[in-house]
Image (cartoon, rainbow, N blue to C red):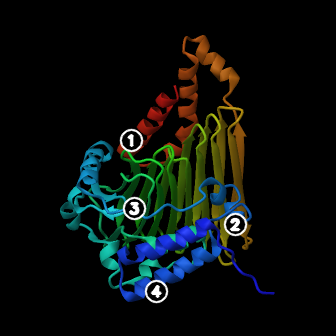
Amino acid sequence: MNVAVAKTGKGRAVSDLFTSAEGRLPGSPSVIAVRREAFETYERLGLPHRRIEEWKYTDLRALVGEVLPLSAAPDAAALKRAADAVKVHAIAGARKLVLVDGVFASDLSDVKALASEVGFGTLREALEKDADLLKTASTDAVIALNAAMATDGVVLSIADGTQLSAPIQIIHLATAASASAFTRSRVMVGKGARATIIESFVAVGAKAYQVNDAVVLSIGDNADVAHIRLMDDAPDAVNISSHFVTVGANTKLNFFNMTTGAAVSRLQGFITLAGEGSELSANGVNLLQKTEHGDTTLVVDHAVPNCVSREVFRAVLDDRAHSVFQGRIIVRPDAQKTDGKMMIRALLLSDEAEADNKPELEIFADDVSCGHGATAGALDDSLLFYLKARGLPEKQAQALLIQAFVGEAIEQIADDGLREHVIGIAERWLERRQ
């Protein structure tokens, strides 16, 4: 039987967008060929929908509908607004790498200060000679679309034994309304290196925009890496991010994600523990309100023996917000002595809020210690009564309990300054709720 894919009007619009944008996309002829192949994959699959198991709770066809046109390169006015935003959102002491509407902004970045410790380049430059930066093994439609349309990103190489003197903050700023930005970054951390990488997504007056970002992170043996992701896009924005992480032997990776904005967001992470003796701590907090939809989908692949993974995720939902957590721990046949644990908790502040938690274990080895759990519930009435009986207004009492609820995940951030910064984000969200 022959099967033909019928294109809708929206499908034709996306095809036209790729054709019109092709001349603006960087890369050598071999890169353009990879882009066309990736777009054909996306065109064949279309936006993910609920009949795809991994996207069951985040139906992009229903929630998003179509991909917006590619954003134009930022003009002088956009860069001026971005510069003002950097002053507000830059983390003290961090070295900044700024992307504005999907384009690297060197004048807003600390390239010279970074160059003394880190090899730096942009995706736009790298694609003139290396098509591999766009290749992934995944057949996911949004990942394929990212490969087809990525305009820029940062390429970082941290040499063996390097101990970064300051965190690196990659700041994504959106200034263009009703447009899409496609970015992809590559970070290589050498053996024995120590680094902190922060990603921030921020709206600069833009509305109804879309972000499709990808990060490819490889970490060598005996390294220690913290990866902090802070997403605070516009209330009507769409943010889809994909992470591909490979961890070497005897390495520690501490990952944290906080989502406090965007109408629709999804972080999908694929982490492979490829070296023995490694430890992964993956934690996150979703703070959602109104009709916001936040999805965290994480696959942790224990490919070798003697590795440890811990996952702690918290979601706080108000109004008609919807939080999704899909976590899968895979233990390969040779990965004996694996120790993997996962716990997801959701706090519902409204009867109309929804939390879908789906923890999974796929175990193909027999000498392991693995477990998972998921809960959902409301604030404890007895604790609320206790606090109100001592003179606290109800909203303030709720805020204290919510802070305690998300605290377990936030406390996993080792750096004191970064932890206080994240606590401040949570406190500002609670203030807006009041």
Total count of labels: 4
Among the two numbered marks 3 and 2 on one chain, the one whose residue lies closer to the N terminus: 3
Among the two numbered marks 3 and 1 on one chain, the one whose residue lies closer to the N terminus: 3
Q: Which residue is mark 1?
A: 421
Relative depth, front residue between 314 and 353: 353
The local crowd at label 4, few if under 14, some if 14 to 19, many if 20 or more residues have their Cα within 10 Å, is some
The local crowd at label 3, few if under 14, some if 14 to 19, many if 20 or more residues have their Cα within 10 Å, is many
For discs 3 and 1, the disc positioned in front in the rendered view: 3
Determine whether the residue tagged by mark 2 lies in a helix, strand or loop: loop
Query: Marks 4 and 1: CB-CB under 8 Å?
Result: no
Whether 141 is drawn above or below 226: the answer is below
Q: Which residue is mark 3?
A: 71
For discs 3 and 2, the disc positioned in front in the rendered view: 3
Q: Which residue is mark 4?
A: 33
Relative depth, front residue between 302 and 40: 40
Mark 2 to mark 4 CA distance (whole Å): 44 Å
Task: State the residue at coordinates (40%, 55%).
Answer: 199
Residue 368 circle label? 2
What's the amino acid at mark 1? His
Q: Place residue 169 in its image quadrant.
A: bottom left
Mark 3 to mark 1 CA distance (whole Å): 30 Å
Determine whether the residue tagged by mark 1 lies in a helix, strand or loop: helix
